Image (cartoon, rainbow, N blue to C red):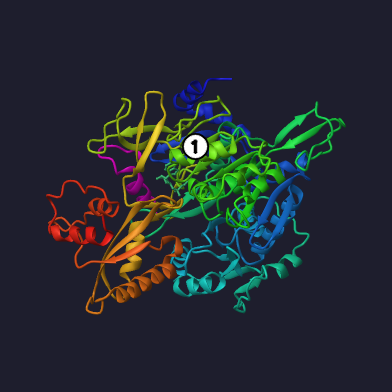
Amino acid sequence: MPSYADFYRQSIDQPDAFWAEQAQLIDWHQPPQQICDYSNPPFAKWFVGGTTNLCHNAIDRHLKDRASQPALVAISTETGTERSYSFAELHAEVQRMAAVLQSLGVKQGDRVLIYMPMIAEAAFAMLACVRIGALHSVVFGGFASGSLASRIEDAEPVAIVSADAGSRGGKSVPYKPLLDEAIALSKHKPAAVLMVDRGLVPAAMHAGRDHDWAALRAQHLNATVPCVWVESTHPSYTLYTSGTTGKPKGVQRDTGGYAVALAASMKHIFDAGAGQTDFTAGPPQGESAAPLGGSDPRERRSVGVFFATSDIGWVVGHSYIIYGPLIAGMTTIMYEGLPTRPDAGVWWSIVEKYKVTHMFSAPTAVRVLKKHDASWLKKYDVSTLKALWLAGEPLDEPTAQWISDALQVPIIDNYWQTETGWPILTLANGVEQQTTRFGSPGKAMYGYNVKLIDESNGEELTGPNQKGVVAIEGPLPPGCMQTVWRDDERFVNTYWKSIPGRLIYSTFDWGIRDADGYYFILGRTDDVINVAGHRLGTREIEESISSHPNIAEVAVVGVADSLKGQVAMAFAVPRDASGLTDDAARLKLEGEVMKHVDSQLGAVARPSRVYFVTVLPKTRSGKLLRRALQAVAERRDPGDLTTMDDPAALQQVKDLVGP
Ligand code: PRX
């Protein structure tokens, strides 16, 4: 076994040899002719000339060895249901969905927007799309009609797959009215809407446009829809993410590079696989020791079970609920519900019941659990867990320590982005076991030529503990974004030109690296905030608030919060303040503004407070002093204010947020 340092070095010094080897982890219809074409930087083409299919790699190729092994287990503590699909059953369901989508006019290269709760049909829809070479664009089920409409307009889907409702804390959240409103708002109209009826709430159907999944599924029960072999560089999906402008960016991912990157990450980072054949074992123990019909009667396999508590609306859901585990031949668990309902033991009861081997969650979920008694974690047998991986936001040391003590398994932080699709920084324990350092997500992962850059002059910071922008030298490794959907210019200008004098990918995060190569992430360099693991652009929220008729101007900043990491806080200048003479009137307008954001962006983006001021703190040239505003909102020293136009502006903010 190589040391991780050697493994990493090879990936950077001999990338073609390195990735050619990794490419063997997946099935190709035509093997690639060229490993990487970087003749037109920063656009990287991986595995050029190769043809493959994501769905084939996730399902079909496992039918030979593990047709009867559970592939997907969809658990909902909202509806009290558990549905399990073997690879063979998943294969059948995905073909039905693919046939239905084809019957609705979806062809290779078309987009299908998926606006779904965490139910098995959402996975069928994603896999069906890539099976036929269509691109899925999953929009988080909690998003409001305004956000949904802007994504429909940008993706121009032929069809939308949705459901009657999501459910949260036992309360149904109807999706169809939001979807209908979004379609009404959007300039682009989809030809078809496919509705999964969960029986939660009645949904109005538009004749000619809306179709019922159950009825169409019944017509395609025996459908066989072969995988379409697509070029490695054929886009598999787009996924929208927030940046510094209000317009969301469609992160576009390829097919072959993504499949290879995920297969490699399952092996090297998660040290995960379909399961081991254990000839020494006695009788099977429990459900996960599924006998798969080996010729030796003593042969037993312990199945690898991956449980990522994310949502398919996020990148973690794409990579580590759906594609990564399935490509590795593992059982994947999809969970709809809260971590604390019916009680704070629910996740660990799932770990025990399904003998989960790999678990993936977010620090914010752990902080929620931390409010409950640690004994909930001790009630269940979690000894099958190899480790718990956490990502999406900074993992603070007390949270890491608490969950580590409670679970008694390694807690592994990992840092990445929607744009990259798989971890940039973590520990590759499948290559070499490395020690965790609380507070650090770990080291640069193979394939990522990570640099710390001095923002002012573009120079690389090579010494230990120097603070710089975390940047990645091109080409980005396989699996990372190809471009911004239909906007190459935005891809180049946003990500590759933010550092003076260099063409280098900026993560927009500050970081330092210690003498041993461990990185520490110190927050964003831009106006993106992270609320309970959800990435939000403050500009998006500002645009929404300023579209309220009585708001003239607004500034939104992220403020530290012990549970959610950050929360949005708004400071707004009303157009007409004459009615805001008392607390009741201010609270009324505050409530209205919050509702306005809810309906346009969804509750995730709702500011924790909307304070009304007469003027915002700005420089004499009119630039908003966001950092000063944020500092005051966090009750910190705002620093140098010599450029500030009107000192009274910040004083108002101080008075409002209090000491
Ligand atoms: O600021 C970093 C933070 O989340 C951003 C990416 O968010 P998103 O696109 O939603 O992707 C999440 C994929 C896991 C990053 O730019 N972030 C993500 N992981 C960490 C993190 N910050 C600190 N530590 C992490 N482990």
Judge from the rendering whether residue 605 lies leftward or rightward of residue 571; answer left or right: right
Magenta-colored stretch includes residue 588: no
Residue 402 percent location from the top left of the image: 51, 40
Judge from the rendering whether residue 593 lies leftward or rightward of residue 204; answer left or right: left
- Disc 1 crowd rating (10 Å Cα; few below 14, some 14-19, many 20+) is some
Q: Is residue 279 above or below residue 174?
A: above
- Residue at image position (55%, 56%) is 136
Residue 182 percent location from the top left of the image: 48, 71
Residue 369 percent location from the top left of the image: 54, 49
Classify mark 1: helix, strand or loop. helix
Pointer 1 residue:
401
- Residue at image position (68%, 64%) is 100
- Residue at image position (27%, 51%) is 635
Residue 432 percent location from the top left of the image: 55, 24
Q: Which residues are magenta?
A: 487-505
Query: Hey, what amino acid is under mark 1?
Result: Gln
Camera sees residue 533: yes
Q: Is residue 624 above or below residue 493?
A: below
